[in-house]
Amino acid sequence: MTALIEMTQVTKTYGEGKMKVVALHETNFQLNAGEFVAIVGPSGSGKTTFLTTLGQLQEASSGKILVKGKETGSLTEKEKTDLRFREFGFILQASNLIPFLTVKEQLDLIDRLDKGKNSKSDRKELFDLLDLEKVQNHYPKALSGGERQRAAIARALYNNPSIVLADEPTASLDTERAYQVTEMLAAIAHEQGRGVVMITHDTRLLDKVDRIYVMNDGHLVEETHA
């Protein structure tokens, strides 16, 4: 299988000396093309630290991260920004929508940055699937929590990233919509050959994933089945 991203002996610490906190102990992880992986574990266990370190949103304290075979440690900040835009789609707990842009304009911005590589049919398909057609001209402050989350999902998926990192993507959604979003993420991985990592507390959504990892006190362990 083709590795999209690899972590080798990666750690993340905060502070120094007596104030030093190990948020992520030595971690090895690989996400392959076509895989849908879930990360579960209690709040405060290090799941979000793992995800943001994996996605180059913060630097690892030690170890190596490779994206499509290229080590990221020596990249400049501009190169990392370009890498995140080109290869990653982020669905974070804070929806991170730009407050002065409507839902439609959030995607228009991606078009401008990506030189219009995305089609109107891609946008319509996302809006239809996520039920955003009626609110596409609304600003984030006028949206419900679920609508903001769905808009963030649309923005994350719009430029067809090869790696999707989702932190509780269904937390603000009703049950039916949560299942739809999970099925969509599974299809993105299994049918389009992309890689998806999803943090979730909802064990009902795990039927669609290929592998499950458990995070506990900064230790990531793959769950095995007899």
Image (cartoon, rainbow, N blue to C red):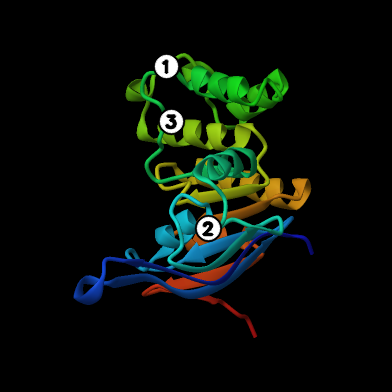
Residue underneath mark 3: 147
Q: CA distance from mark 2 to mark 3?
A: 27 Å
Regarding residue 176, the answer to whether it shows in the image is: no
Please, is residue 193 above or below residue 35 in the view?
Answer: above
| Quadrant, the N terminus | bottom right
Query: Hey, which quadrant is residue 44 in on the image?
Result: bottom left
Residue 15 can be seen in this image: yes
Tell me which label, 3 or 1, sits earlier in the chain: 1
- Answer left or right for 19 relative to 217: left
Residue toward you, 178 or 186 = 186
Q: Point out the residue furthest to the left here.
A: 18
SS at circle 2: helix
Q: Dot 2 surroundings within 10 Å: few (below 14), some, or many (20 or more)?
A: many
Mark 2 or 1, which is nearer the eye?
A: 2
Q: Residue 121 in the image: x percent, y percent?
A: 71, 22
Q: Secondary structure at mark 1?
A: loop
214 versus 157 height, above or below: below
- Looking at the image, residue 211 sits to the left or right of residue 121; the answer is left
Which mark sits nearer the N-terminus, 2 or 3? Answer: 2
Q: Residues within 10 Å of mark 1 (few under 14, many from 20)?
A: some
Q: Amino acid at mark 2?
A: Leu
**Numbered circle sitting on residue 54:** 2
Q: Is residue 218 above or below residue 189?
A: below
Mark toward the start of the polypeptide (2 vs 1): 2
State the residue at coordinates (42%, 30%): 97
Secondary element at image label 3: helix
Residue 138 disc label = 1
